[in-house]
Amino acid sequence: MRLKSSLVATAAALATIIVPLLASPAAAASGTEATVSTNAYYGRMVIGWGLNPYRLDPIQIVAQDRATDGYVIGIRLITNGESGHKVWSMRTVPSGQTTASWSTYLQAGWIDNAYFEVCKIGASSGVIARCESSSVMHNPFDDSSVSG
């Protein structure tokens, strides 16, 4: 009988330690979302912000080419944080398709905010003709208590 009560007491003690850890902000992720839409193109990103380690995970990306106008549609992420202002690689809707989607992650230290650009790129020249920026998505975690 003592063994059974000891096991119950141990399980209860572990639950009081483990459950709060699993529910803590450091283990949680929070998400933000933005879209850019015109007659010629559409772009959308959904970003999961994580702590410990700092990372954007997952990043869900959708780009859509809505016009047959000789342009390719590209989408790229832009971040601002401890690594400075970074423009990440452009992803383009493959030739012959109207929509493309990607799922990725980014681990680049503390990121204060992120936004993306949807760009029209000359199909034959590869030159960016025009880009439109999304709204800025701010890190939902408060780092004001972190001394730096």
Image: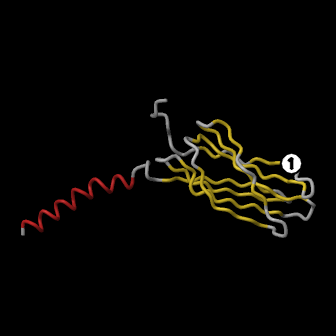
Q: In which quarter of the image is the N terminus?
A: bottom left
Q: Which amino acid does label 1 sit on?
A: Arg
Quarter-of-image position of residue 122 = bottom right
Q: In this view, does 73 lie to the left or right of 54?
A: right
The residue wearing badge 1 is 130
Of 32 and 10, which appears nearest the observer?
Answer: 10
Provide residue 103's location: percent of width, then percent of height.
63, 61
For the view shown, which residue lies furthest in the left direction? Answer: 1
Q: How crowded is mark 1: few (under 14 residues within 10 Å), some or many (20 or more)?
A: few
Count of numbered marks: 1
88 on left or right of 37: left
Q: Position of residue 148 (x, y in %)?
A: 49, 29
Q: In which quarter of the image is residue 99?
A: bottom right
Closer to the camera, 108 or 56?
108
- Position of 27 with respect to 124 (left or right) is left
The image quadrant of residue 5 is: bottom left
Quick check: 3 above or below 13? below
The percent position of residue 36, horizontal first and vertical second, equals 75, 54
Residue at horizontal 52 percent and vertical 53 percent from the top? 30
- Its colouring scheme is secondary structure
Q: Circle 1 — which element?
A: strand
Q: Compared to 8, does 135 lie above or below?
A: above
Q: Residue at x 34, y 53 (%)?
A: 20
Residue lying at the far top of the rendered structure: 148
Tell whether 13 sits left or right of 65: left
- Residue at horizontal 60 percent and vertical 38 percent from the top: 81
Pinpoint residue 3: horizontal percent, then vertical percent. 10, 66
